[in-house]
């Protein structure tokens, strides 16, 4: 996965995040999109994000991954 430094993350537009209002789950490329899907699944199982947030992240990642 490509490095995403703090500076690069802050420079990313909100539209590059799975949850843009919180600037969480950055997806500037395919490897980050796959990682965001995996982390969102883990967080949903733990109960820290809702099912609707996970769906939003999955839809965004699927668009990036071309699925």
Image (cartoon, rainbow, N blue to C red):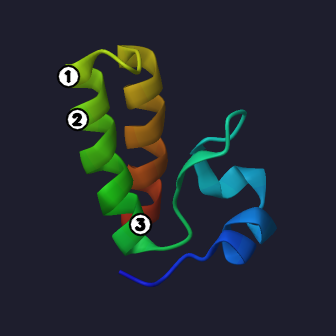
Q: Give the CA distance from mark 1 to mark 3.
A: 20 Å
Point out the tag, 1 or 3, that comes first from the N-terminus: 3
- Percent of width and height locating residue 45: 20, 22
Report the residue marked by disc 1.
45
Residue 59 lies, with reference to residue 46, above or below; the image says below
Badge 3 or badge 2: first in the primary sequence? 3
Q: Residue at x 68, y 41 (%)?
A: 20
- Residue extending farthest bottom: 2
Q: At which x and y percent is residue 26? A: 55, 57
Image quarter in which the C terminus is found: bottom left
Secondary structure beneath dot 2 equals helix
Local SS, label 3: helix
Picture coordinates of residue 29, whole percent (x, y): 48, 74
Crowd band around label 3 with a 10 angstrom C-alpha radius: few (<14), some (14–19), many (20+): many
Q: Quadrant of residue 57?
A: top left
Residue hosting label 3: 32
Instruction: Calculate the distance from the C-alpha at mark 3 to the C-alpha at mark 2.
Output: 15 Å
For residue 33, above or below residue 11 = above
Whole-angstrom CA distance, mark 2 to mark 1, is 5 Å
- Classed neighbour count for the residue bearing mark 2: other residues with Cα under 10 Å, few (<14), some (14–19), many (≥20): some
Give how far across and how far down residue 3 sits, in percent.
48, 82
Q: Secondary structure at mark 1?
A: helix
Choose between 31 and 42: the one closer to the eye.
Answer: 42
> Which image quarter: residue 30?
bottom left
* Residue lying at 46% horizontally and 24% vertically, measured from the top left: 53
Q: Nearer the viewer, mark 1 or mark 3?
A: 1
Q: Residue at x 38, y 29 (%)?
A: 54
Residue located at (30% from left, 15% from top) = 47
Tell me how many marks there are.
Answer: 3
Location of mark 2 (residue): 42
Contact flag, marks 2 and 1 (Cβ < 8 Å) = yes
């Amino acid at each position: 996965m490509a490095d995403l430094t703090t500076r690069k993350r802050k420079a990313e537009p909100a539209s590059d995040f799975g949850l843009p209002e919180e600037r969480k789950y950055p997806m500037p490329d395919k490897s980050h999109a796959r990682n965001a899907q995996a982390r969102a699944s883990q967080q949903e199982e733990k109960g820290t994000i809702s099912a609707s947030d996970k769906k939003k992240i999955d839809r965004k990642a699927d668009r990036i991954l071309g699925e």
